[in-house]
Every structure is written in C-alpha cells, then in structure tokens.
Image (cartoon, rainbow, N blue to C red):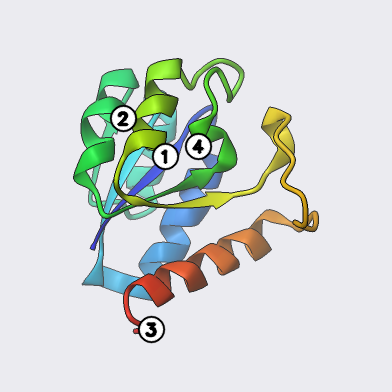
C-alpha cells in the first residue's frame, strides 16, 4: 500500500504520523511525504518516509497516485495551514480516488460534529486503526 502523508508549516503532525505508520506497519507500506514546504517534507523523511516532495505541484501530481492520503482535516480546505495549502492542493486531495484518513484538528476553523477534542496522539491511533482495517486487519 502506498500512503501519502501531507503536512505543512513545521511538519510536526506529519512527523508523528510517519513515525507511527513506520512502527505499526514497518516496510509493509510505502510512505510518500508530501509537504507544503521543504521543512515539513524533510522532517517527514527524517522520520521514516520512503520518498518526499514539496510544494503545490508535488501534491497535485502525487495525490491521484497513492492508495491512501492521511493528514489533518485542513488538507481538503483551500488556504488552510496559514495559507500554505493552496486551492489546487485542496482540490487535488479532495478529488483523489485514494481513501482519505483525516485527523480532525480544529486549527483551520473546521469543526466536525460528534468528534471529541482529543490530544493528537489519540487521533493518530484512531487513524492507524482505520488504515489497519483498510489493509485487511493485518
């Protein structure tokens, strides 16, 4: 399974996701780090992603080429991440046929009804369980 982790700004969320994916799935998956900037991409690569690319074109080109996309809910919202996530990036992610696992952080003024406010590590655990179910419970 090829998984794209999308993050921006400092890359801390992407780093945490990549680390957890690598611990849980090892080399069973290929992780593509897609950063809105080079810093975010570099941090995800350092955390265990197989490949990485930065910027709008990298996300637009690669979003349709992966099996699953994971990141904060802002990756489907134009101009989120303090404007780093462009409308074209959000469109590419939203229109990708890949499954999407979105972490409901309310930093982008998007609030999801029915979701409790939890610390980031709890949301990442839930995301890992979703991915595990997509992979057939391995």
Quadrant of res 27:
bottom left
Give the number of the mark in front: 2 or 4.
2
Density class for disc 4 (Cα within 10 Å; few <14, some 14-19, many ≥20) is many
- Give the residue at mark 1: 6
Density class for disc 2 (Cα within 10 Å; few <14, some 14-19, many ≥20) is many
Q: Which circle marks residue 59 in the picture?
A: 2
Depth order, front residue of 124/22: 124
Depth order, front residue of 100/14: 100
Q: Which of marks 3 and 1 is nearer the N terminus?
A: 1
Q: Across the whole image, how many numbered discs are drawn on residues? A: 4
Q: Which of marks 3 and 4 is nearer the N terminus?
A: 4
Q: Earlier in the sequence, mark 2 or mark 4?
A: 4
* SS type, badge 4: loop
Q: Hey, which residue is sitting farthest bottom in the picture?
A: 138
Residue located at (54% from left, 31% from top):
10
User: Gap in Å between the C-alphas at discs 2 and 4?
Assistant: 15 Å
Residues at badges 3 and 4 in contact (C-beta under 8 Å)? no
Check the image and report above or below for 133 versus 116. Answer: below
Check the image and report above or below for 72 versus 80. Answer: below
Q: Which of marks 1 and 2 is nearer the N terminus?
A: 1
- Give the residue at mark 3: 137
Q: Position of residue 55 (x, y in %)?
A: 33, 21
Residues at badges 2 and 3 in contact (C-beta under 8 Å)? no
In screen coordinates, is 108 left or right of 23?
right
Residue located at (23% from left, 36% from top):
62
- Give the residue at mark 4: 11
């Amino acid at each position: 399974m090829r998984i794209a982790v999308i993050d921006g700004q400092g890359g801390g969320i992407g780093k945490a996701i990549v680390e957890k994916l690598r611990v849980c799935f090892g080399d069973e998956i290929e992780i593509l780090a897609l950063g809105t900037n080079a810093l975010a991409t570099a941090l995800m690569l350092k955390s265990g992603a197989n490949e990485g690319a930065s910027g709008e074109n990298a996300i637009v080109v690669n979003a349709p080429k992966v099996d699953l996309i994971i990141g904060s809910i802002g990756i489907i919202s134009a101009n989120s991440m303090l404007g780093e996530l462009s409308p074209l990036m959000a469109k590419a992610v939203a229109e990708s046929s890949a499954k999407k696992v979105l972490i409901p952080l309310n930093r982008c003024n998007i609030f999801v009804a029915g979701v409790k406010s939890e610390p980031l590590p709890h949301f990442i655990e839930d995301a890992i369980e979703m991915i595990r179910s997509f992979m057939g419970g391995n």
